[in-house]
Image (cartoon, rainbow, N blue to C red):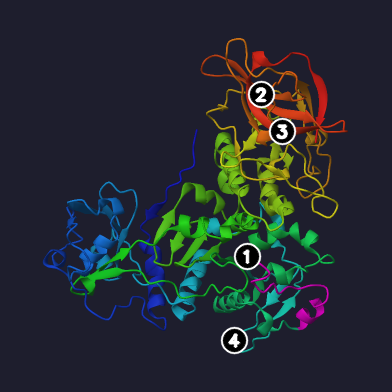
């Protein structure tokens, strides 16, 4: 069974870099700048030849920065693994465009060529040793080059309107950003057939006590349609307007300005259109490290250490601190801890991530760094799909299941200011999955039509989620008449606050489970049509199943493996408790023991319904044959 790889691979991308290099060099400041002095090198480092197939550096721990005039020796010492500082010697070797330390899994130094030295060493990546100044023309030029190159040359990143006819639709409102010469900014309501191109912003609002929550509401909507006072806007919005103009676009979408906020606003109607807003944008600006609206993202980033080696342009290379870390800077950044952002990232065709360390470009062709490095990751590629989830559709059924399980596992650990938004923040992705898997579903659960026997596992496996190993208890979210949706069934992980996992392949092997479709009926058994409801539509959420008593262990000593949503629900005596199990599937494990994968349910107080309280694996011999029909909501 295919698994998602976590590691990033680096790809030499000189063909792309050569296309944009001249445009950057012609910007108002040079592409590569010097530190104002020639690098001081020792005799050994002066003689280094990066083109030598047997290139090697053996660095002694006695070479400390304050004891040697050699800039390269100092950089090598600084970037060593801490545990190797006392070693007699440390060896560095060339691996593509990197200097790697023996026995170290971490990339700490990169080698970069300029346009001239690349001709003699095409295996080494062309790159920028120094970052571009925040808010400068070279930085804007790189953004323009990224965007223009993708639109012109990336077939995979173009909109597939045959798959998504609605992708021609425009947002209800856009911000006309004007220009530097005519800086009037106002809300604009486009017509259906205008064909406007626009940029969208992905950002955190932040704590309202610390950040400017400037919004459009029912009292100022008419004023905003005439003009938005730019002096009232938070700094983050001002940066977004400036960048939109520099990208040579006239229209920008920002949620708090383009959606009417407040009780009498149109958030409920606009939330269902969020899928189209980010899918149709030519590019999304992500303020990845901003804490809220008052933070700027066009900022000056920390410098990185590097040493230029070579007597002339034809032999010049830069040895640089490795700072290309999309996983840490973006995926683990503060913005991507927010629940709404996973959907925004997955639905966007192109994103420019602004972090405190550098800019990153993300599209269907991979990740490009401001240093001009290209990075690829198999797992990230699924979320970088410009026409999500078409890339996943070319995979096996098992990989599709792993894909949506990983998606929901990740999403369930993200943060919401309002926990009741947990359903809405992923509704657009869920609609896409339902459409392309050709299934019915809602609230994180999918079911294939009954005639597709091979796909019965979608339903069973998506129901068999469990409390995450890093979570003590799942806390029920309080939905009521004032929330959207008004209720969520207990069999959905969206009813709870906290991270989830799934019964994985080690517990529930692929292609070995007989799914008990006659014992468990879903809400979608009634329709199986385009009229089926999903998370942001209303409909019955009732599961009907056969509930049975069970023992904790069987006569042959094989114990059940039970996973409760809350530890406090585990009883001392299963037989005399009110807990029942509903069998979802049966399989034979490697020891030839028949096991049942089950939902654990308990009766609701003063109600005819049952509530899910967990899942488990139980030896089939431990389950009583007598059954009763129950309804689970």
In this figure, which residue is indicated by the disc labeled 1? 204
**366 within the magenta span:** no
Left or right: 187, with 68 as reference point: right
Q: Nearer the viewer, mark 3 or mark 1?
A: 3
For the view shown, which residue lies furthest in the top direction?
A: 555
Mark sitting earlier along the chain (3/2): 2
Estimate how packed mark 4 is, as few (under 14), some (14 to 19) or many (20 or more) residues with alpha carbons within 10 Å: few
Above or below — where is 542 with respect to 5? above
In this figure, which residue is indicated by the disc labeled 3? 613
Looking at the rendered structure, the secondary structure element under dot 4 is loop
Q: Residue at x 47, y 80 (%)?
A: 136
In this figure, which residue is indicated by the disc labeled 4? 180
Q: How many marks?
A: 4
Do the residues under discs 4 and 2 have CB atoms within 8 angstroms?
Answer: no
Residue 458, quarter of the rendered image: top right
Mark sitting earlier along the chain (4/1): 4
Above or below — where is 515 with respect to 357? above
Marks 4 and 2, Cα distance to the nearest angstrom? 64 Å
What type of secondary structure mainly makes up the magenta span?
Answer: loop
Looking at the rendered structure, the secondary structure element under dot 2 is strand
Disc ID at residue 607: none
Looking at the rendered structure, the secondary structure element under dot 1 is loop
Mark sitting earlier along the chain (3/4): 4
Q: Nearer the viewer, mark 4 or mark 2?
A: 2
In this figure, which residue is indicated by the disc labeled 2? 585
Mark sitting earlier along the chain (4/2): 4
Q: Nearer the viewer, mark 4 or mark 1?
A: 1
Range of residues picked out in magenta: 202-226
* Foreground pick, 113 / 418: 418
């Amino acid at each position: 069974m295919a698994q998602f790889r976590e590691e990033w691979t680096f790809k030499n991308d000189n063909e792309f870099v050569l296309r944009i290099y001249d445009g950057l060099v012609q910007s108002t400041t040079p592409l590569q700048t010097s530190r104002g002095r020639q690098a001081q090198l020792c005799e050994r480092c002066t003689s280094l030849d990066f083109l030598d197939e047997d290139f090697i550096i053996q660095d002694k721990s006695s070479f400390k920065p304050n004891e040697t005039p050699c800039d390269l020796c100092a950089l090598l010492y600084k970037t060593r693994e801490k545990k190797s500082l006392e070693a007699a010697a440390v060896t560095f070797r060339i691996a593509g465009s990197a200097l790697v330390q023996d026995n170290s899994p971490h990339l700490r130094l990169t080698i970069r060529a300029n346009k001239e030295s690349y001709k003699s060493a095409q295996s080494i990546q062309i790159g920028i040793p120094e970052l571009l100044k925040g808010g400068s023309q070279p930085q804007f030029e790189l953004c323009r080059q990224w965007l223009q190159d993708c639109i012109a040359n990336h077939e995979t990143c173009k909109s597939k309107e045959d798959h998504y006819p609605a992708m021609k639709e425009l947002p209800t409102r856009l911000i006309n950003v004007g220009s530097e010469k005519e800086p009037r900014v106002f809300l604009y309501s486009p017509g259906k057939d205008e064909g406007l191109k626009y940029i969208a912003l992905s950002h955190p609002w932040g704590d309202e006590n610390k950040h400017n929550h400037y919004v459009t509401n029912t009292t100022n909507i008419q004023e905003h349609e005439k003009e938005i006072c730019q002096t009232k806007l938070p700094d983050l919005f001002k940066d977004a307007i400036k960048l939109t103009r520099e990208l040579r676009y006239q229209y920008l979408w920002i949620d708090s300005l383009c959606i009417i906020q407040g009780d009498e606003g149109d958030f409920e109607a606009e939330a269902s259109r969020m899928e189209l807003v980010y899918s149709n944008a030519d590019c999304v600006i992500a303020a990845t490290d901003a804490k809220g609206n008052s933070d700027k993202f066009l900022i000056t980033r920390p410098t990185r250490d590097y040493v230029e080696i070579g007597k002339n342009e034809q032999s010049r290379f830069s040895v640089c601190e490795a700072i290309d870390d999309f996983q840490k800077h973006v995926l683990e950044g503060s913005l991507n801890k927010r629940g709404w952002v996973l959907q925004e990232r997955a639905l966007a065709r192109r994103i420019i991530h602004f972090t405190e360390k550098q800019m990153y470009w993300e599209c269907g062709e991979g990740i490009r760094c401001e240093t001009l490095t290209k990075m690829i990751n198999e797992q990230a590629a699924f979320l970088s799909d410009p026409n999500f989830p078409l890339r996943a559709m070319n995979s096996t059924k098992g990989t599709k299941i792993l894909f949506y399980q990983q998606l929901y596992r990740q999403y369930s650990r993200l943060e919401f200011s309002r926990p009741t938004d947990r359903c809405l923040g992923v509704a657009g992705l869920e609609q896409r999955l339902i459409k392309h898997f050709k299934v019915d579903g809602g609230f994180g659960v999918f079911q294939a039509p009954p005639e597709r026997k091979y796909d019965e596992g979608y339903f069973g496996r998506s129901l068999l989620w469990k409390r995450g190993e890093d979570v003590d208890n799942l806390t029920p979210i309080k939905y009521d008449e004032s929330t959207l949706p008004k209720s969520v069934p207990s069999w959905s992980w969206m009813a709870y606050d906290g991270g989830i996992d799934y019964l994985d392949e080690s517990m529930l092997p692929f292609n070995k489970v007989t799914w008990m479709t006659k014992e468990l009926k879903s809400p979608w058994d009634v329709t199986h049509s385009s009229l089926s409801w999903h998370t942001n539509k209303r409909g019955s959420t009732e599961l009907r199943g056969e509930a049975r008593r069970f023992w904790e262990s069987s006569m042959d000593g094989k114990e059940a493996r039970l996973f409760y949503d809350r530890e406090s629900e585990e009883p001392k005596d299963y037989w005399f408790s009110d807990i029942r199990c509903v069998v979802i599937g049966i399989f034979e494990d490697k020891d030839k023991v028949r096991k049942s994968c089950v939902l654990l349910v308990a009766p609701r107080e003063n109600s005819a319904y049952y509530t899910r309280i967990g899942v488990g694996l139980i030896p089939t011999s431990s389950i009583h044959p007598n059954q009763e029909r129950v309804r689970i909501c």
